[in-house]
Amino acid sequence: MTGRSARPKATMNETIPQLSSYDETSLDAAFATLGAEVRDETSTPHDAEAFRLRWLGRKQGRLKLVSDAWLKSAPAEARKPLGMRFNQLKQQIEAALAGATATPLASAKKAGIDITLPGAVRASGIQHPLLKTMNEIVAVFHHLGYSTALGPQVESDFYNFEALNFPPNHPARDTQDTLVVAGQQSRPSRDRLLMRTHTSPVQIRTMVAQAAPVRIVVPGKVHRNDAADATHSPVFHQVEGLCVDTNITFSDLKGTLDHAMKALFGSGVKTRFFPSFFPFTEPSADVQISCIFCAGKGCRKCKQSGWIELLGCGMVDPAVFASVDQQREAQGLPRAYGTAKISGFAFGMGVERIAMIQHGISDIGHFYSGDMRFLEQFA
Ligand code: DAH
């Protein structure tokens, strides 16, 4: 036997795996090696025609070699399992070839699509101006160590009013014209549901669940039965704040809100605190900032006063702490608020009002109109 006559066989054995036996494990291993080779060759850019020749070539194609070396000499009982695997490999090769010829470019051409035309530009979204302002306010307080708390928009009479020291039929309720949920007459008045008129109920929910110290901000939607006009909307947004700890004083409240107003409107802004009334704070105050349009000189925006009223605040009323402790006890929790050392302050502001002043917007309706010409200005 010469070296030359032995060569064809040697070539075959070099380019396809040796099949040591026809049992299932050996067949699986051998075909897995070939399948992996096909995948390797097609996973990167390749010449489809060279690939076709290498695997399906009539004379020296690898499938032909496999067929010659393995199929022809297979014992009768191995024919079927071998043939099945052979066909699977063939299908894999053909599928790879079909994929290579169906490039996106080729299919687009076939469908008569000119992919060189410019595409439709899809504008990326932006934060709604209200959400932007709300996040700004919340961020100012996060930097002071406050965390965010949330509560439900459908609230009970108890959390929205009673626990905040608005007794049933008290005239203070008239300041918040309320949208109530229908069909609640058979329930005790404290359990009747309504759309929350402010974010203050989350003060109660938080203190009932957690002992002092508390530092939270509460951003959220609130609802009132108000007719829509340039400055009112039946649905609007507030950010509430609550800070309760040992020996919190009115000067802590003043310092905190003065800092927050400077952070939101610029360091040149001044604040002043005006006596006011809220049932859940005592004393209560309205906070005014020096008019940012005329720097306090007096203009149409501030009605010539030089000041703009922006938010309500005050020291947490002892009646609120008492109500919270009562509920904590009812839930088997220790009293945590009605002690001599614990005190706190609260505040609440309207997001729309602040955003309108920040951007000089004169009609609240712009926020809800969905008019792109308005919204695009905040991109
Ligand atoms: N909840 C009040 C309102 O909607 C705003 C408010 C005033 C909140 C004083 C407070 C506060 O926390 O202390 O009219």
Image (spheres, grey):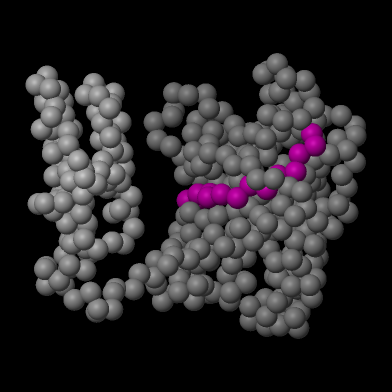
Q: Nearer the viewer, residue 292 or 124?
A: 124
Query: Going by the image, does 318 lie left or right of 347?
Result: right
Q: Main secondary structure of the magenta part?
A: strand
Q: Nearer the viewer, residue 348 or 14?
A: 14
Residue 108: image x %, image y %? 17, 68
As drawn, 103 above or below 175: below
Does residue 114 appear in the picture of this structure?
yes
The answer to if 219 sits in the magenta stretch is yes
Residue 49: image x %, image y %? 18, 62
Query: Going by the image, does 40 lie left or right of 376?
Result: left
Q: Point out the residue furthest to the front here.
A: 1
Could you tell me which residue is drawn at 60 percent across and 63 percent down?
133
Residue 261: image x %, image y %? 74, 65
Q: Quadrant of residue 135?
A: bottom right
Residue 358: image x %, image y %? 62, 72
Could you tell me which residue is drawn at 76 percent across and 68 percent down?
262
Query: Going by the image, does 279 lie left or right of 118?
Result: right
The answer to if 76 sits in the magenta stretch is no
Could you tell me which residue is drawn at 66 percent across and 55 percent down?
138
Numbered range of the magenta stretch: 212-225
Q: Quadrant of residue 168?
A: top right
Q: Quadrant of the N terminus?
A: top left
As drawn, 278 above or below 376: above
